[in-house]
Amino acid sequence: MDPLALLTLQALNALSLSALLFFISLGLTLIFGIMRVVNFAHGALFMLGAYVGVTAHNASGSFLLSLVAAPLAAGLLGLAFERTALSRLYAREHSAFLLVTFGLALALTEAIRLLWGADARQAELPDALSGIVFVMDEPFPVYRLLLIGAGVLCGLGCWAGLQRTRLGLLLRAASQNPVMTAALGNDVGRVRAFVFALACALAALGGALAAPLLSASLGLGSNVIIDAFVIVMIGGMGSFLGTAAGSLLVGFAQTFGNYYLPELALGMTYVVMIAVLVLRPGGLFGRPE
Amino acid sequence: MLEMQGLRGGYGPAQVLNDVSLSVRAGEVTAILGRNGVGKTTLLRGLMGLLPRLSGRVTLAGEALAGLPTHRVARAGIGYVPEGRQIFPELTVTENLAVGQRSPSRLWPAERLFGLLPNLRERQRNAGRSLSGGEQQMLAIARALVTDPRVLLLDEPSQGLAPMVVQELARILRHLAGEGVAVLLVEQNLRLTETVADRIAIMARGTVVHDDTAAGFRAAEDELRHRWLTL
Ligand SMILES: Nc1ncnc2c1ncn2[C@@H]1O[C@H](COP(=O)(O)OP(=O)(O)OP(=O)(O)O)[C@@H](O)[C@H]1O
Ligand SMILES: [Mg+2]
């Protein structure tokens, strides 16, 4: 294969992986930004999205519908969880919050095992999406291009939402000073609930999009949450741009690592993380707290 | 306009507010003086629904406020200019103002606001953190005003400001009272307080130990200062 074509295809593969990672790490970042805590259940919600997506797709025959059902289910679950459990914990120790989200991760994983069994579920792509296109005379799956597009759209949509809408303004204000945001007449509890639900929905959308590539299996959540943590740390905790940059870095490091340094493939993510954190301890776009 | 009766409360088991009663009238500046740590900030936080523990009565034009969550207190018509200004550092001046405007301000549209606080006009697109201390204080006041408050609470607004800016602050507070706002000013700056206040209260050990007109304060000033204010 022409080396330039090889490089291009690898780059496209890396971009499609980055897009999937972006869906999960973006939600983690939003939650961290406004609540100053890490949601351990985020990987499990990604996994839930994959299972709900596969089931909805098989039941309805519509892939598009599965991309609506998965985020809707996870968003509602997240909303209920935030209102009943998390909203009581913000004033307490962070460790209580971590434990409760860790508990949700375990409970979700067990619930999935009960509902769907221990076998992996493979999603079939509809014909329109399972084709290939030729990039520099080499075949490349259409679906991976679609993932890249979805990631870009999601990024632009969230960016516009943060910068241009009132809710985005309140989210930014509350992540800088929640007390003052409330003292100006805004119900910060509702902002938190919305952000948590949105972040859960994004993770599940990522899971539903990933299902045709990775298949839905019980290890999916814990695999992907580690990458997402690394991305959020690389980007600078709570930074939107940092999360985009971190997703790209990790996506490229894993894809090119797999190809050129397969012995090191598993460690590539950490090599990148350590390199970034040595150079910039607060992450790429992190601010000193 | 704002009535407090028998307020008690604090952060943990220790009581910081110990039976505070005070009225703040519309069109007047009511000042609270007192040594460090007597509970002035705690009182304002209590009014805003920001204390873990508070009992007693607070009414705003007859409507009960004690026990409401912070955002409801603000919506009822109380503007809060906190100790240390608490500007959103990463938001622009315009965005800082927008946080308090669930709908565009009725009483303080841009022209009127920048007429009162002209320094902010050219700074609208600058980030909060890039403003000088004086500009941040003006922004903190503007941000409270655009919520259309009937009562404005200010916690040591003159702290760290140059004398020129303190004079400007005095002009603004007088103007607001003239417009019918009920101003409750917590201060350590005696000169500013005497320039702007209609009534002066003194707090000690979590309660109000003196509450009189500004003229009454002046008449007994030496004794009051010695007893309650100087170290
Ligand atoms: N967050 C808090 N948690 C526990 N105790 C507090 C807290 N904030 C203040 N206190 C205590 O409450 C008392 C009153 O403090 P407060 O800040 O209300 O005083 P102040 O009159 O505003 O003083 P200053 O003039 O220094 O601003 C002090 O003894 C202080 O130590
Ligand atoms: Mg104080």
Image (cartoon, coloured by chain):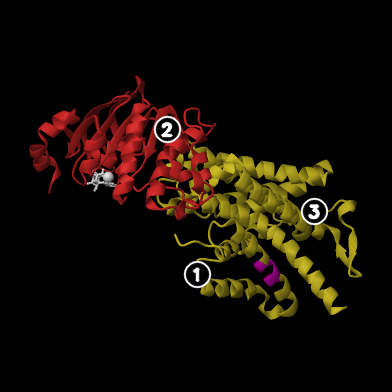
Q: What span is colored magenta in the figure?
A: A249-254
Main SS of residues in magenta: helix
Look at discs 1 and 2 and give the one toward the viewer. Answer: 2
Instruction: Characterize the local packing of mark 1: few (<14), some (14-19) or many (20 or more) Cα atoms within 10 angstroms.
Output: some
Amino acid beneath label 1: Pro
**Residue under numbered circle 1:** A281
The relative height of residue A13 versus residue B22 in the rendered view (above or below) is below
The relative height of residue B67 versus residue A285 in the rendered view (above or below) is above
Amino acid beneath label 3: Ala
Amino acid beneath label 2: Ala
What is the distance, in whole Å, between disc 1 and disc 2 at their CAs?
39 Å
Task: Confirm whether the magenta stretch covers residue A250.
Answer: yes
Taking the spot 85% from the left edge, 59% from the top edge, the residue there is A142
The chain that appears yellow in the image is A
Return the residue nearer the eye: B11 or A187: A187
> Could you tell me which secondary element the residue under label 2 belongs to?
helix
Tell me, yes or no, if residue A161 can be seen here. Answer: yes
Q: Which mark is residue B74?
A: 2
Where residue B100 sits: x, y (%)? Answer: 48, 37
What is the distance, in whole Å, between disc 1 and disc 3 at their CAs?
40 Å
Where residue B55 sits: x, y (%)? Answer: 28, 30
Quadrant where the image shows the N terminus of chain A: bottom right
Chain B, chosen colour in render:
red
Q: In the rendered structure, the residue with mark 1 lies on which chain?
A: A
Instruction: Characterize the local packing of mark 2: few (<14), some (14-19) or many (20 or more) Cα atoms within 10 angstroms.
Output: many
Q: Is residue B35 left or right of residue A288?
A: left
Where is residue A239, by image quadrant? bottom right
The relative height of residue A92 versus residue B142 in the rendered view (above or below) is below
Q: Which mark is residue A123?
A: 3
Taking the spot 87% from the left edge, 56% from the top edge, the residue there is A130
Residue at mark 1: C-beta within 8 A of ligand 1 = no
